[in-house]
Amino acid sequence: MPKTDPISEIDPGAVIEAAAESILITTADLDAPGPSIVYANPAFERMTGWSRADLLGKSPRILQGPETDLRIFADLKDKLVAGEVWEGQTINYRKDGSAFHMEWSIVPLKDERGEIYQYVAVQRDVSARIEAARRLEEAQAAERAADRARANLARYFSPKLVSTLADKDQPLGPVRRQDLAVLFADVIGFTRLSELHEPEQIIEMLRDIHGWMEQVIFGLEGSIEGYIGDAVLALFGFPDAGKRDATNALSCAIELLAAAEK
């Protein structure tokens, strides 16, 4: 038996009808009120809610609405007239008025003389993809905000307390303590020191001093209430009191003195 060409047995019309992708065919007249729809497959009907009978003879502009970004069509006519493929994405509307994100490409169909006689548009509803991208962006923004919040907390609290505060669903709120160890430490003769050095040198020196002060304070589970020039005010027993708060404050003072000697 002679072999048959499987491609020759394919019915293009049946393929388009059965396609999962939404397909629209229009006339080649791009000037308003054209082009006109001459065919819409069942996938297009399902996606938009418009029946084929509703669409025939209408312009694809029937899908446009208040939030359709018309700027995407700026290069549409030039590309299609030149025989190129055009692609775009914007908000379009179903027959019931509901909006959705549509992504589509338009391909010119040419006759044997190379002249364009129709356009085929393949559309996709990408609303789910757009929503997933939006949620991912929100999650990343929230993560960046959380990182910034942790960085701010880390300037005043020990890593352990930062973790506790950052993981709380509710604000800490007022905390009342009967016993709280307070440590105030400053650099002796800093005023005189400031007079002998340039401002940039003093600022750099303060960064170094506060840096090793923080390490010592946080290492003994203290928190920093604030900086006053070269001085630091540290608390031990905040927000939760412990049996070693006073001991930790004294140990911190000793270690600060030892660090200053170095």
Image (cartoon, grey):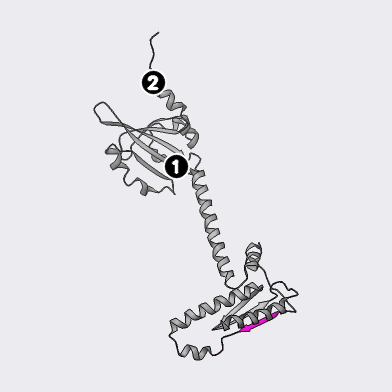
Residue indicated by mark 2 = 7
Residue 22 x, y percent position in the rendering: 45, 34
Residue 133 x, y percent position in the rendering: 50, 49
Q: Quadrant of residue 8?
A: top left
Amino acid carrying label 2: it is: Ile
Residue 240 x, y percent position in the rendering: 72, 71
Crowd class of label 2 (few under 14; some 14 to 19; many from 20; radius 10 Å): few
Q: Nearer the viewer, residue 179 or 11?
A: 179
Which mark, residue 102? 1
Q: Residue pushed farthest top?
A: 1
Residues rendered magenta in the picture: 177-188
Q: Quadrant of the N terminus?
A: top left
SS for dot 2:
loop
Residue at the (56%, 86%) spot, across then down: 187
Mark-to-mark CA distance, 2 and 1: 32 Å
Q: Nearer the viewer, residue 79 or 252?
A: 252
Specify whether 249 is left or right of 131: right
Residue 207 is one of the magenta-drawn residues: no
Q: Quadrant of residue 2?
A: top left
Residue 224 x, y percent position in the rendering: 61, 76
Q: Residue pushed farthest front?
A: 262
SS for dot 1:
strand
Specify whether 78 is left or right of 41: left
Mark 2 vs 1, N-terminal side: 2
Crowd class of label 1 (few under 14; some 14 to 19; many from 20; radius 10 Å): some
Which of pointers 2 and 1 indicates the residue nearer the eye?
A: 2
Which mark, residue 156? none
